[in-house]
Image (cartoon, rainbow, N blue to C red):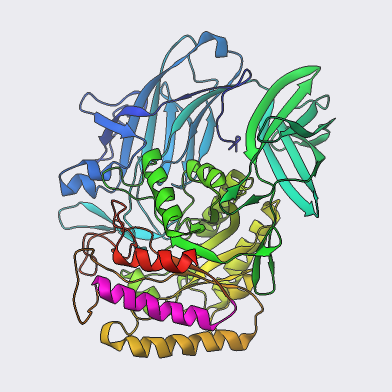
Amino acid sequence: MESLLYPIRNRFRDEMKLDGLWRFSFDREEKGEGDGWTKGLPKSAINMPVPASFNDFFTDKESRDYCGPFWYECDFYAPEKQEGKKTYIRFGSVTHRATVYVNGVEVGSHEGGFLPFVLDVSEAVNYGENNKLVVKANNELDETTLPCGNVSTLKNGKKLVKPYFDFFNYAGIHRSVWVMSLKNEHITDYDVVTDINGDTAVVKVKLVAASASFKLKGKVVLKDRDGKVVADSTFDMSDSNNTDNTVSGKCELTVKEPVLWDVKKPYLYDIELSVIDGEVIDSYEDKIGIRSIEIKGTDILLNGKPVYLKGFGKHEDFDIIGRGFNYGVAKRDFECMKWIGANCFRTSHYPYAEEWYRFADEEGFLIIDEVPAVGMMRSFFNFMDAGRGAKYTYFFETDTVPKLKENHLNAVREMIVRDKNHPSVISFSLFNEPETISTFAHDYFKDIFEYARELDPQKRPLTGALEKTSAPDKCQCYQFCDFISLNRYYGWYISGGSELSDARELFIEEMDQWKALNLNKPFVFTEFGADTLATEHKLPSVMWTQEYQNEYYDMNFEIFDKYDFVKGELTWNFADFQTSEGTFRVAGNKKGVFSRNRQPKDIAFKLKERWEK
């Protein structure tokens, strides 16, 4: 795998975004390769914005719901000065898989729709000329993909995706695409670990470079917000990895009286990393925060002090652009979260675009970063079955599990490699609402958690969101979690409406069972909520009205406050979002505290009052 470092431009590195209007074509008859589309799309191809989902641009159902292969194409110019260097194409994400061609030459492929991939195209590029970039993508799901689902075929022959999850299967090139030019010997990765001891911090840095030479030296310079050097180190790059032709070195930087990165006080240091062969041959600049995160008993400690998580499960979802990243939407979301008093969000149910994390680093928000392991329960109405406590469906006992596990491990690796240095990321979530009540699930997730613990240099707390079936007397996987994350819908999927008083009693009954286990771990509610139409009011309340949403939240808050091991509440959801159509969804999921266009419902003011206290 090539470097997943976020692209930057300096005197050693060049990058150019290819965002804009690309050419696009559905491949309904799957004839694209046979007809030579790898060298360029037919004249019938249409314009398509990148980054964006393709689905909601169309006005016909067949295009919006398209399932199968589809193609993108654009041209880019490669300057003559880049010849002899390494030229890479970097995709922020293509959902759910992609094969890439440059000038008709296949340069690589990638499985997984929510993480970046980088391809070396040095040998395929024509320097001093325009080059044709073609991407063949596919949005089909099965029980080996993350997320999981399947595909059905209608009587008219049309394929229709059937997600095992409750959000729309948006597809396309969702994030930016770059062409990058680097020297043959260049920085590929770095790790940062910060240890805080009183008024001193030690910043441990590992630097990795693409090189076969043991003559390289590394240099790290740390500067404060005013540009003053607070620490630096020069060291040998003497450790080699023959499998990927890299060398690495380590150093420790001592920072006296450090300014810590904290919630809403996001102090960031500038870090400059260089590799030297007589002179500097490559450098990379970034921002880091000095902070600690740990679990101690039932407390979540940020910089040694208890923190209560307040915020949301979210989605990358907005009108028209679907899951495509947009800075304007991100800015509005952070402003809404600041207004309401939130300090945290979970990237449900997949890693978000990198810009979200860089934004959170700057704004001082905490992130539970989630791998796209959702839908690991065989169910058409997964959201209802999970909310009510579905029966065991033997998901982890089929012959598809080895391939699923391979994809899961790879997604965990790509997520941690990409996001490991963000101070905003305080935890990695390794699943959302899978079956967890069998020994097969236990053995599956044991390996996933062990792998994640090995990968993360900061050794962050690990978790995973448990649905109702994962009860304290049945779940075989909660012991892997450093803090317990519960998705619970008492008062909505369980005993909703006029039965709310019963929902309260059932909720207390379950929480007493968790308490009796005496796990000595924090509990965080990573989902709770009630579908609500912003237009609906009624006295007395009924489900789907704003009055009922308020009553529902009052009951949940009462339960949270009864148990001192509850250390967080991330409501579902930040904003209304699109789902597959069905009788249980009114043009999407309406559990948002904000509407899909980011305006507050009544419940937002109740949350603001509670969270600002």
Up the image or down, 570 lies above or below 222; here it is: below
Q: Is residue 333 visible?
A: yes
With 17 as the anchor, is 587 left or right in this view?
left
Location of residue 479 in the rendering, given as x and y in whole percent from the top left corner: 63, 74
Q: What is the tally of numbered marks visible in this picture?
A: 0
Look at 56% across and 35% down and name the residue there: 6
Q: Which image quadrant for residue 541?
A: bottom left
Q: Is residue 549 magenta?
A: yes
Quick one: 609 or 223, which is closer to the camera?
Answer: 609
Quick one: 337 or 437, which is closer to the camera?
Answer: 337
Quick one: 491 or 429, which is closer to the camera?
Answer: 491
Up the image or down, 99 lies above or below 530; here it is: above
With 26 as the anchor, is 14 left or right in this view?
right
Look at 23% across and 41% down and name the residue there: 57
Location of residue 315 in the rendering, given as x and y in whole percent from the top left corner: 39, 54
**Which quadrant is home to the N terminus?**
top right
Quick one: 31 or 489, which is closer to the camera?
Answer: 489
The residue range painted magenta reads: 544-565
Dominant secondary structure of the residues highlighted in magenta in the image: helix
Location of residue 475 in the rendering, given as x and y in whole percent from the top left corner: 54, 79
Up the image or down, 195 lies above or below 399; here it is: above
Location of residue 135 in the rendering, given as x and y in whole percent from the top left corner: 39, 33
Q: Is residue 522 magenta?
A: no
Q: Is residue 173 visible?
A: no
Up the image or down, 365 lies above or below 5; here it is: below
Look at 47% across and 48% down and name the residue there: 352
Q: Which image quadrant for residue 132?
A: top left
